[in-house]
Image: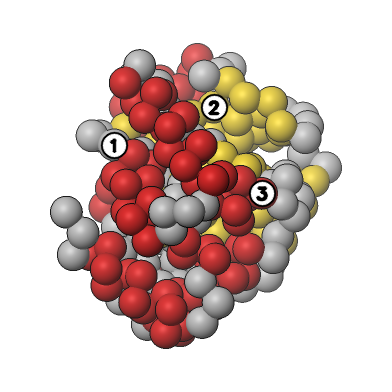
Amino acid sequence: MTIAHSGFTVIRVPMLADNYAWLVSRQGVAAFIDPADAGAAIDAVERSGGRLDFVLLTHHHDDHIAGAASLAARFGAKLIGNAADAARLPKLGIALNDGDTLDFGGATLRMIATSGHTIGHVTYLFGDAIAACGDTLFSLGCGRMFEGTPAMFQSSLQRIATLDPGIMLLCGHEYTLANARFARSVDPDNEVLAARATEVERLRRENQPTLPVLLADELLANPFLRAQTAEEFARLRAAKDNFR
């Protein structure tokens, strides 16, 4: 499915059991985000015209990087990732630090540090239009805290929360249905959340995706984004880890 948003074109690419990779382009420049499966990624690029300039990696987990080297080699694309986590990533062509930018079809591509799910996790901002947030933030949820601390993770989420509300979030997994069940258990009186949960249930019954999603909607419904302190985040994260 192709989505147009603020001058960018976004293609959602399902991979593995529940992963989403993303192909983003603007004015002839294209970037592929988190290719777990080289074959599926190559097919998506070829169907979109066969040009790929960058492969962006949000973090080192295999279900986000396994196809990266092969994809980059196939199209001569530059592999981009966090300089601070380069030892755990495929060999980078461009290593960025927090806040570094590149030109992307006349817009700014910025990398920001969003550790928590892993140490060294990053989010890529395409102007004020798109945030490719990997496993830091999901619709109605967030990633598991494998390596970070509650303070680190909550700070990363608040960094995303302060972006333009109209920004489109490109998340790494189709976890929204399970996230909605938990979110409603901790915020049962939130009418916006209830409406989103109903819509998510309908979409999944029809085997339709729930992503991408706008930050404005998540700010009203996602309990992890709404957590105001590290202690509140830690309680939510522990509760979600044990939720059945």
**Label number found at residue 11:** 2
Can residue 35 be spotted in the picture?
Answer: no
For label 2, the crowd category at 10 Å Cα-Cα, with few meaning under 14, some 14 to 19 and many 20 or more, is: some
In the picture, measured across the screen, residue 125 lies left or right of residue 150, that is right
Q: Which residue is depicted at the point 66% across and 49% down?
A: 216
Q: As shown in the figure, which amino acid type bears the numbered disc 1?
A: Asp
For label 1, the crowd category at 10 Å Cα-Cα, with few meaning under 14, some 14 to 19 and many 20 or more, is: few
Q: As shown in the figure, which amino acid type bears the numbered disc 3?
A: Ala
Q: As shown in the figure, which amino acid type bears the numbered disc 2?
A: Ile
Q: Which residue is depicted at the point 68% across and 70% down?
A: 99
Q: Which residue is depicted at the point 54% across and 27% down?
A: 11
What distance separates the C-alpha of mark 1 from that of mark 3? 24 Å
Single out the mark in the foreground, 1 or 2. Answer: 1
Vertically, is 101 above or below 174? below
Asked which secondary structure carries label 3, the reply is helix
Q: Which residue is depicted at the point 66% across and 54% down?
A: 125
Indicate which disc, 3 or 2, sits on the residue closer to the N terminus. 2
Q: Are marks 1 and 2 in contact (CB under 8 Å)?
A: no
Which residue is the site of mark 1? Answer: 18
In the rendered image, residue 51, in percent from the top left (x then y), is placed at 59, 26
Asked which secondary structure carries label 2, the reply is strand
Can residue 236 be spotted in the picture?
Answer: yes
Quarter location, residue 162: bottom right
Indicate which disc, 1 or 2, sits on the residue closer to the N terminus. 2
Which residue is the site of mark 3? Answer: 216
Single out the mark in the foreground, 1 or 3. Answer: 3
Indicate which disc, 1 or 3, sits on the residue closer to the N terminus. 1
Vertically, is 78 above or below 232? above
Quarter location, residue 150: bottom left
What distance separates the C-alpha of mark 3 from that of mark 2? 21 Å
In the rendered image, residue 222, in percent from the top left (x then y), is placed at 49, 55
